[in-house]
Image (cartoon, rainbow, N blue to C red):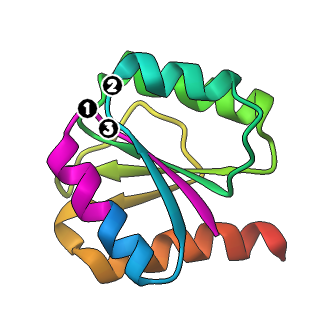
Amino acid sequence: MKILILTTDPELAMLRKRILEDAGHQVSALTTEKEALASADSRDPFDVALLCHRLPDATARKITRLYHDRHPEAKVVYVVHLYGEWPEVEADRYVVGADGPDALVRVVSEAVARAAS
């Protein structure tokens, strides 16, 4: 599966990239708002866009809308920082970062599996 990580936190990007690569996925990480927004216009195919809570909400909402419009086959997974947070981002799936690497891999895989069903 091809995954695109979008965050403004390079450390989180590297950690998530390694976790997902170790799970057998092909992963790219973008760590600026400008890169993240530009990726929505890209025609590069991917299966999942993983949006981090470190992106400003307005940027995350805009990226999600653009991905749903321009990449309808891809799924958007939003990483929530804390339990009880209700992000204003309309993602296909959500995962709490504090749940750890196993939850991240599981939710990303479920998002794509559900779409294939």
Q: In which quadrant will I find the N terminus?
A: bottom right
Q: Judge left or right: residue 10 versus residue 107.
A: left
**Which numbered dot is residue 112?**
none
Label 2 sits on what residue type?
A: Thr
State how many labels appear. 3
Q: Judge left or right: residue 41 versus residue 5.
A: right
Label 3 sits on what residue type?
A: Thr
- The image shows residue 90 at horizontal and vertical percentages of 54, 37
Label pair 1/3, CB-CB below 8 angstroms: yes
Q: In which quadrant will I find the C terminus?
A: bottom right
**Viewer-proximal residue, 58 or 3?**
3
Label 1 sits on what residue type?
A: Thr
Q: Which residue is mark 3?
A: 7
- The image shows residue 80 at horizontal and vertical percentages of 29, 50
Q: Which residue is mark 1?
A: 8
Kind of element beneath mark 3: loop
Q: CA distance from mark 3 to mark 2?
A: 7 Å
Q: Which residues are magenta?
A: 1-16
Label pair 2/1, CB-CB below 8 angstroms: yes
Q: Which of the two labelled residues, at mark 2 and mark 1, occupies the earlier sequence position?
A: 1
Q: Judge left or right: residue 117 versus residue 53.
A: right
Label pair 3/2, CB-CB below 8 angstroms: no
Q: Which residue occupies 59% across, 76% down?
A: 110
